[in-house]
Amino acid sequence: MKKAAVIEFFHRLAEANPAPATELEYANPYQLLVAVVLSAQATDVGVNRATRPLFERVTTPADMLALGEVRLREAIRTIGLFNTKTKNVIALSERLISEHGGAVPEDRAALESLPGVGRKTANVVLNTAFGHETIAVDTHIFRVANRTALAPGKTPLAVELGLERVTPAQFRRHAHHWLILHGRYVCKARTPECWRCPVADLCPYQPKTPPPKARKPASA
């Protein structure tokens, strides 16, 4: 995609959603970190359903350790891979206390050293909690970047680096959320809703998906 088209691409997404934000519910960086770890291979809706009552009791790593592994497992058992995630959340809480004074570090390497935290999770926390211009490539962003030719790549890292190269400076802070939300609600995996896409004319994807046919009224 040419530079002018990229600028127009992000301009339209920004115009449609001037203040994009994560759909995960949280009150502080620690709760965000936990929610993102829990969201792996799970929906934000499902994570929020589990964390609403959990986060009423747990706001810090110390609270999580006081809750304990057994009660945490019960609280998140509706989320996929809850056994592994329970162990990771307890372990990362212990590490935050022992190595970072109970605070979430504003550093990629430190975040990635925590149990259950990879590059994508670190990027989400850095962007959402601390305002860094990072782009966390999940399945939605990977699909949008390739389908639209915005930043094609064979791996999430290749797409991330491509997006960092092409995204204009004025859009880097929120690019992550614009692309995720676009992929989640418009540029869907099975049937992209090209008929209502604000950047359809900039996208090479073919064939464009037509609008759904109106249902015929039932005969009397």
Image (cartoon, rainbow, N blue to C red):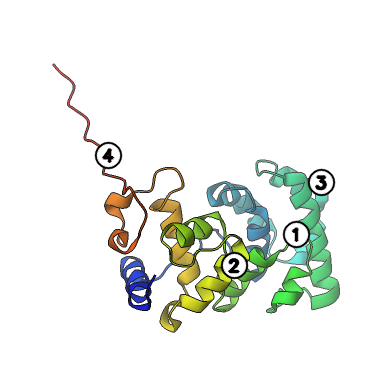
User: For mark 1, what is the residue?
Assistant: 116
Query: CA separation, marks 4 and 2?
Result: 35 Å
Identified by mark 4, the residue type is Pro
Q: Sort mark 1 into few (<14), some (14-19) or many (20+) by Cα contacts within 10 Å.
A: many
Disc 4: which residue: 212
| Residue tagged 3 | 70
Front: mark 3 or 1: 1
The answer to which of marks 4 and 2 sits earlier in the sequence is 2
Sequence order check, earlier mark of 4 and 1: 1
Q: Residues within 10 Å of mark 4 (few under 14, many from 20)?
A: few
Closest to the observer, 24 or 198 = 198
Q: Nearer the viewer, mark 4 or mark 3?
A: 4
Instruction: Measure the C-alpha gap from mark 4 to mark 1.
Output: 41 Å
The first of marks 3 and 1 along the sequence is 3
Q: Residue furthest bottom?
A: 169
* Residue at 61% across, 61% down: 155
